[in-house]
Image (tube, rainbow, N blue to C red):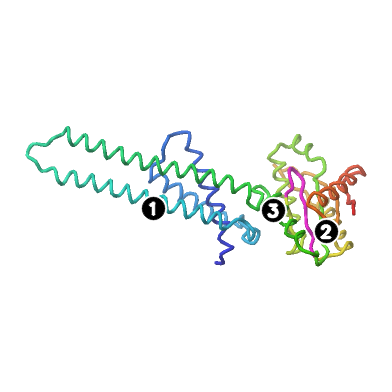
């Protein structure tokens, strides 16, 4: 397995582990080592199940923050290796205490005091381990903001869009034509109101899958926010970009997502612009947004351009 393919497993492992741990965090103050091991096993099983079912798209994770998650994973492993070692030593103290007490008259008060002392050490180690858990979970939450994928649609997110465009604009020349499509699902609030927010999420997932299937490998889909997506089309001309946009409109009209045995009609409004030298991220977003605004005002379910 290539190095850049390990990231989705680390990413999903951290997320699954945090979900399982948060579910019991309100029930007790500390997590026993054996309980933590069970949570790790459950999280690992969930990740493997997701991979086997095809839910995890390895290719889509090529640009995620693999190094940072690897560091988190190693911190977790190192911390619990130390904790397990210390707990092992404490257990040895228990055994030594029993073996060395061969006096004909057993001092129960002394033994009780020693056992209480050992129990305190053990509780301290488990508490320290839980503090490490809390710190790691906070770091995972921070990384989830920075990481490249939107958790719902599995498309790239806004952070990834900004990073990608920044990399493009840092070059002296663009080298080839790049077009941006800003796409909005028409009347999305009505879908949420009529069918509920779960149905709304299903529609967004449906649109993301439709976009991915319709595009070439070099094109990228980003969830910009809410029901808005941005697609970057690489190495094409204006006619090619227009044809892609029109194909997306047609596919969306002719394919309807199903929710609770009901078909949901969805159409798109698309605003298109071309990246040019001297652009900034804001100027690209501003032009594509202006084109999208025209598409909305001109009746929706259509493409408009702004250059």
Splitting the image into 4 quarters, where does residue 68 fall? bottom right
Q: Give SS at disc 3.
A: helix
Q: Main secondary structure of the magenta part?
A: strand
Q: Residue 86 location, x and y as percent?
A: 32, 48
3 or 2: tag closer to the N-terminus: 3
Determine which residue is flagged by label 1.
81
Q: Quadrant of the C terminus?
A: bottom right
Q: Residue 248 location, x and y as percent?
A: 82, 55
Label 1 to label 2, Cα distance in Å? 51 Å
Q: Residue 209 location, x and y as percent?
A: 72, 54
Residue nearest the viewer, comparing 281 with 214: 281
Label 3 to label 2, Cα distance in Å? 17 Å
Splitting the image into 4 quarters, where does residue 243 fall? bottom right
3 or 1: tag closer to the N-terminus: 1
In magenta stretch: residue 209 = no
Label 3 to label 1, Cα distance in Å? 35 Å
Report if the CB atoms under discs 3 and 2 are less than 8 Å apart: no
Characterize the local packing of mark 1: few (<14), some (14-19) or many (20 or more) Cα atoms within 10 angstroms: few
Determine which residue is flagged by label 3.
160
Q: Residue 260 location, x and y as percent?
A: 69, 42
| Magenta stretch, residue numbers | 223-234
Residue located 10% across and 43% down the image: 102
Residue nearest the viewer, comparing 6 with 257: 6
Determine which residue is flagged by label 2.
179
Q: Give SS at disc 1.
A: helix
């Amino acid at each position: 397995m290539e190095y850049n393919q390990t990231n989705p497993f680390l990413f999903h492992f951290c997320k699954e582990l945090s979900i399982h741990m948060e579910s019991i965090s309100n029930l007790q103050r500390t997590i026993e080592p054996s309980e933590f091991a069970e949570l790790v096993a459950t999280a690992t099983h969930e990740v493997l199940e997701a991979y086997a079912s095809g839910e995890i798209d390895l290719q889509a994770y090529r640009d995620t923050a693999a190094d940072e998650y690897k560091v988190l994973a190693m911190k977790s492993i190192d911390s619990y290796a130390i904790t397990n070692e210390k707990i092992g030593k404490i257990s040895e103290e228990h055994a030594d205490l029993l073996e060395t007490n061969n006096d004909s008259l057993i001092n129960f008060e002394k033994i009780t005091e020693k056992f209480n002392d050992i129990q305190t050490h053990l509780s301290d180690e488990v508490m320290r381990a839980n503090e490490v858990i809390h710190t790691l979970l906070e770091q995972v939450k921070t990384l989830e903001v920075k990481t490249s994928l939107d958790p719902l649609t599995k498309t790239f997110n806004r952070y990834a869009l900004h990073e990608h465009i920044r990399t493009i604009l840092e070059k002296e020349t663009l080298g080839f034509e790049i077009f941006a499509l800003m796409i909005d699902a028409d009347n999305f609030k009505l879908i949420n109101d009529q069918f509920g927010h779960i149905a709304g999420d299903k529609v967004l997932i449906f649109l993301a899958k439709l976009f991915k299937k319709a595009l070439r490998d070099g094109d990228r889909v980003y969830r910009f926010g809410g029901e808005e997506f941005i697609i970057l089309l690489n190495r094409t001309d204006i006619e090619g970009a227009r044809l892609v946009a029109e194909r997306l409109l047609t596919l969306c009209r002719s394919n309807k997502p199903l929710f609770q045995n009901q078909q949901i009609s969805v159409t798109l409004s698309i605003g298109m612009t071309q990246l040019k030298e001297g652009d900034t991220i804001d100027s690209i977003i501003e032009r594509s947004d202006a084109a999208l605004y025209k598409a909305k005002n001109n009746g929706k379910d259509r493409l408009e351009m702004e250059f």
